[in-house]
Amino acid sequence: VTYEGTNQVKHTKINRLVHDYELFTMLENGNISSMYARFNDIINALKGLGKVYTNHELVGKILRCLPKSWEPKVMAIEEVKDLSTLPLEDLLGSLMRHQLRMSDQARNERKKKMIALKASEDEENDEDKD
């Protein structure tokens, strides 16, 4: 009787984790590292219970869980890479590099806006002095 209870608990845990896996998405303002940490927790827990996904399945899931803003990068990866042989680590490295580029671009845009704002304020101050 105890063994059946343990089996039932195991199946319940597997079902819950599979559900978490299927509904998994990256948070809109999240980053790749934190997304992968959450994803890895689910995968490792499933692996510990005997449920294993192939690398190809994991790569596909990561690409599908990214927000809409990542769609151009996802399409580029799908067109250029062979997803059936792409190691998960290579995919994550590519996504992290892309995220760094996006962050740098956003930072540069903010700097440009600040410079433009400062320049327009300086012009207004010069006009006020006249």
Image (spheres, rainbow, N blue to C red):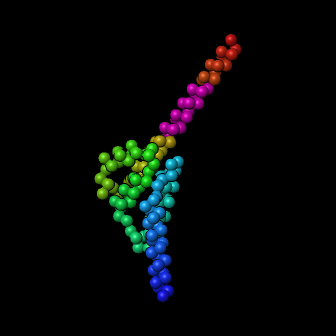
**Residue under the image location 45 percent in, 48 percent down:** 67
Q: Nearer the viewer, residue 12 or 116?
A: 12
- Residue at far bottom of view: 1
Tell me the magenta residue range: 104-118
Residue 116 percent across, percent down from the top left: 57, 26
**Residue under the image location 45 percent in, 75 percent down:** 11
The image shows a total of numbered marks equal to 0
Residue 99 in magenta? no
> Is residue 88 shown to the viewer in this render?
no
- In the displayed structure, 79 sits above or below 88; it is above
Answer left or right for 105 relative to 74: right
Q: Which of the 4 image quarters holds residue 55?
A: bottom left
Residue 99 percent across, percent down from the top left: 46, 46
Answer left or right for 42 relative to 116: left
- Overall secondary structure of the magenta section: helix
Q: In which quadrant will I find the C terminus?
A: top right
Residue 119 percent across, percent down from the top left: 60, 23
Q: Nearer the viewer, residue 98 or 56?
A: 56
> Is residue 54 shown to the viewer in this render?
yes
**Residue under the image location 56 percent in, 30 percent down:** 113
Residue 112 percent across, percent down from the top left: 54, 30
- Residue at far top of view: 130
